[in-house]
Amino acid sequence: MTLKIIGAAPGRTGTVSLMTALEHLGYGPCHHMKACIENAQQTKWFLEAANGLPVDWHEVFEHYQAAVDWPASAYYKTLLETFPEARVIFSDRPAEAWYDSVASTIYQVVPSLPGWLRMLVPHLDRWGQMVEQTIWQNELSGRFQDRRFAVQFFKDRLAEVREVVPPEQLLVHSAKEGWEPLCHFLNVKVPSIPYPRANEATRIQRAVKVLKAANYFPHAILIALVISAIALTAA
């Protein structure tokens, strides 16, 4: 299997919808950040790449026909060099709206991961390191909180993609445009079902709340032990 579709856009640009659409059109499996959460080896490869170590991209994407979302999109130029026949899709949205979406969702995840959980689950700790290094440091230079800088990053990424990718291999696509531009680009039949409309924002925000609450778990255990000890002493 070889990579046929490369997503060049950052996360929170309708990448779950695009992943679902591509898989429905026969370009599956499609790589997504979810692949790193579910597969420890994927996280190891992308952490190595984030730290500047050589990675065999053919091995990374051996079982995938497409790749969208971070972390893969951070390497879209390298991937296009590795898979020169691949088509490139930039899933577009207004830059200001993109910033607000990222700020309220995925930017909150790694800081919310409980330290005790990262110690107990090495894969989760490596995943957190990979996300931090790939996205917030390498891609956004540690300046995501600078709204003007981050919004300009998004605009510059799209301009760069237009400059780097041959026009005949590039589609800039918004989820609002639906199936037609995507299917025309891929030369496939337009499905009769509605274009996927997956919105992960609420799910991510709920997960962040759970992670933040989990940070207090060791304290709750300690308090319970102290109360138990006091009760035993009093008895």
Image: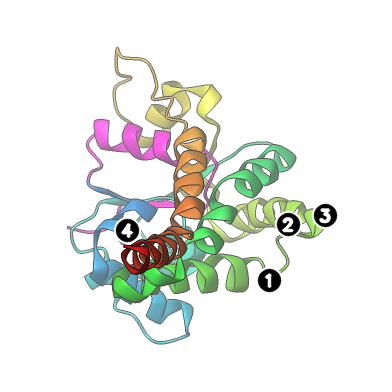
Q: CA distance from mark 4 to mark 2?
A: 25 Å
Kindly identify the amino acid type of the residue bearing the numbered disc 1. Gly
Kindly identify the amino acid type of the residue bearing the numbered disc 2. Ala
Residue under numbered circle 3:
148
Q: Mark 3 Cα within 10 Å, few/some/many (few <14, many 20+)?
A: few
At a point 41% along the width and 23% down the height, the residue shown is: 179
Q: CA distance from mark 3 to mark 2?
A: 6 Å
Q: Quadrant of the N terminus?
A: bottom left
Q: CA distance from mark 4 to mark 1?
A: 22 Å
Q: Position of residue 49 (x, y in %)?
A: 42, 78
Q: Are marks 3 and 4 in contact (CB under 8 Å)?
A: no
Residue under numbered circle 1:
142
Q: Position of residue 102 (x, y in %)?
A: 61, 47
Q: CA distance from mark 3 to mark 4?
A: 30 Å
The magenta segment is: 1-28
Residue under numbered circle 4:
37
Q: Are marks 3 and 2 in contact (CB under 8 Å)?
A: yes
Q: Quadrant of the C terminus?
A: bottom left
